């Protein structure tokens, strides 16, 4: 008798548990599709893509002219990263990447504390955007706004045109561009303030030469 | 979290993981106090409970990948390799009332636990893996973060722990009682 009672409890528990899982699965599957496009922009690439840059290896594209990118910034306004006579540091950020998440506040503090030399601009690029990988930091423009990000930033498209154009293979990737949009060097990973100062120095030198 | 339903789903799994860990801790304390006789507490229920944990973990991870569309990373796959067979091995062991099943199941649970711990550490300290994110699918990315500390490897690790503890409790009740009566 007690065994039968115990069996009934087990069966009831199993049915309730299974029902809960099925209900949640149906709820998840049935939720309306999210408009993914808000996190991406239209990107136009002019010029040849740079060779891919592997983290930890020497940059094979130093001296090559980077392609000019035209697209949308975080507010949907047009933005161009190209030869405009200024030196630039471009940082490519993936919202789901913990290294980017760690680096963004550090970069912002560095900018706010005057780390960026005169004549050198800092640009961001949101790349590899993927809502499923981290819904908390999606869309990336909201994540960056929460971090107080103030640098002009271009959104990559769903075809990852910026990733291909700049030859990026990991995030974050930094690239220093001279006044004629020549690539002065790329670095990948968390580089900290010392790395930022190094890149800023590289960019500043290109203005002097 | 990408949606309310996914958040609720993850929160339920996170709560189950916490309950499982508390239960495992309680069972271990009971085992320390009662010694070998503690096995009488659950008897054959231990293997069925262990199977339910493996089943929930298996179905739970499949829902994440097949319905929520999370991409399992390399370490996630290693943990799946340890957990999925448990859902079958434990069921067969339970049906056959095979007390030797722990010989096959325990190594899987312990190896899985080791991988879960490593994965959890990598998530919290991503620089231990590398200084940059692999665009393909880095193991350091945190797809689920409930209560600020419960991620998928945490839940998997809790599952492996409770399965291992329950296997320790899966002993032949009759033989224990016989031993006790002889003494």
Image (spheres, helix red, strand yellow):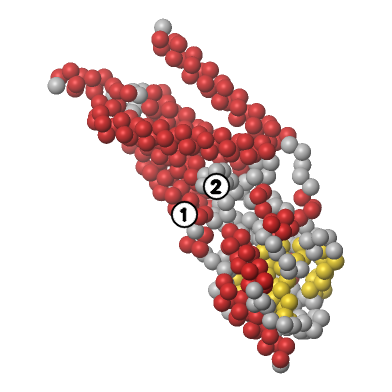
- Local packing at callout 2 (Cα closer than 10 Å; few below 14, some 14-19, many 20+) is few
Q: Locate residue B176: give its quadrant.
A: top left
Q: Is residue A33 visible?
A: yes
Is A4 left or right of B171, judged from the image as shown? right
Is residue A132 shown left or right of residue B20?
Answer: right
Q: How many marks?
A: 2
Q: Quick one: SS at disc 1?
A: helix
Q: CA distance from mark 1 to mark 2?
A: 14 Å
Tag 2, which chain? B
State whether residue A20 is above or below residue A89. Answer: above
Where A99 falls versus A58 (above or below)? above
Percent of width and height locating residue A201: 64, 84
As helix, strand or loop, the secondary structure at mark 2 comes to loop
Q: Are marks 1 and 2 on the same chain?
A: yes
Q: Residue at x 42, y 35 (%)?
A: B22
* Residue B105: percent from left, percent from top: 38, 37
Answer whether residue A42 is visible to the viewer in this image.
no
Residue under label 2: B148
């Amino acid at each position: 008798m007690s065994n039968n009672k115990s069996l009934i409890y087990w069966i009831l528990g199993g049915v309730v548990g299974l029902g809960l899982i099925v209900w949640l699965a149906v709820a998840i599957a049935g939720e309306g599709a999210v408009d993914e496009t808000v996190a991406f922009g239209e990107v136009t690439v002019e010029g040849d893509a740079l060779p891919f840059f592997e983290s930890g290896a020497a940059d094979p594209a130093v001296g090559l002219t980077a392609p000019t990118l035209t697209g949308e910034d975080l507010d949907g306004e047009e933005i161009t990263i190209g030869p405009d006579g200024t030196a630039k540091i471009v940082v490519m950020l993936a919202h789901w990447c913990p290294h980017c998440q760690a680096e963004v506040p550090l970069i912002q503090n560095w900018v706010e504390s005057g780390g960026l030399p005169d004549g050198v601009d800092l640009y961001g690029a949101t790349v590899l955007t993927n809502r499923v990988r981290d819904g908390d930091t999606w869309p990336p423009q909201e994540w960056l706004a929460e971090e107080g990000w103030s640098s002009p930033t271009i959104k990559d498209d769903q075809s990852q045109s910026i990733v291909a154009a700049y030859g990026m293979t990991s995030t974050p990737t930094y690239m220093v561009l001279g006044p004629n949009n020549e690539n002065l060097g790329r670095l990948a990973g968390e580089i900290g303030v010392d790395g930022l100062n190094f890149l800023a120095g590289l960019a500043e030198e290109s203005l002097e030469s | 979290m990408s949606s309310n339903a996914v958040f609720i789903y993850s929160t339920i799994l996170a709560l189950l993981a916490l309950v499982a860990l508390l239960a495992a801790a309680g069972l271990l304390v009971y085992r320390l106090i009662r010694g070998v006789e503690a096995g009488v507490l659950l008897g054959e229920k231990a293997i069925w409970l262990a199977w339910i944990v493996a089943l929930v973990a298996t179905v739970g991870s499949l829902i994440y990948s097949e319905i929520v569309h999370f991409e399992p990373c390399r370490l996630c796959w290693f943990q799946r390799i340890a957990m999925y067979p448990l859902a079958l091995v434990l069921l067969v062991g339970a049906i056959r009332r095979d007390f030797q099943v722990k010989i096959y199941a325990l190594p899987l649970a312990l190896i899985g636990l080791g991988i879960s711990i490593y994965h959890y550490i990598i998530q919290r300290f991503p620089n231990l893996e590398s200084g940059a994110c692999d665009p393909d699918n880095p193991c350091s990315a945190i797809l689920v973060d409930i209560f600020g500390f419960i991620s998928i490897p945490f839940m998997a690790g809790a599952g492996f722990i409770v399965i291992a503890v329950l296997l320790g409790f899966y002993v032949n009740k009759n033989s224990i009682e016989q031993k006790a009566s002889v003494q």
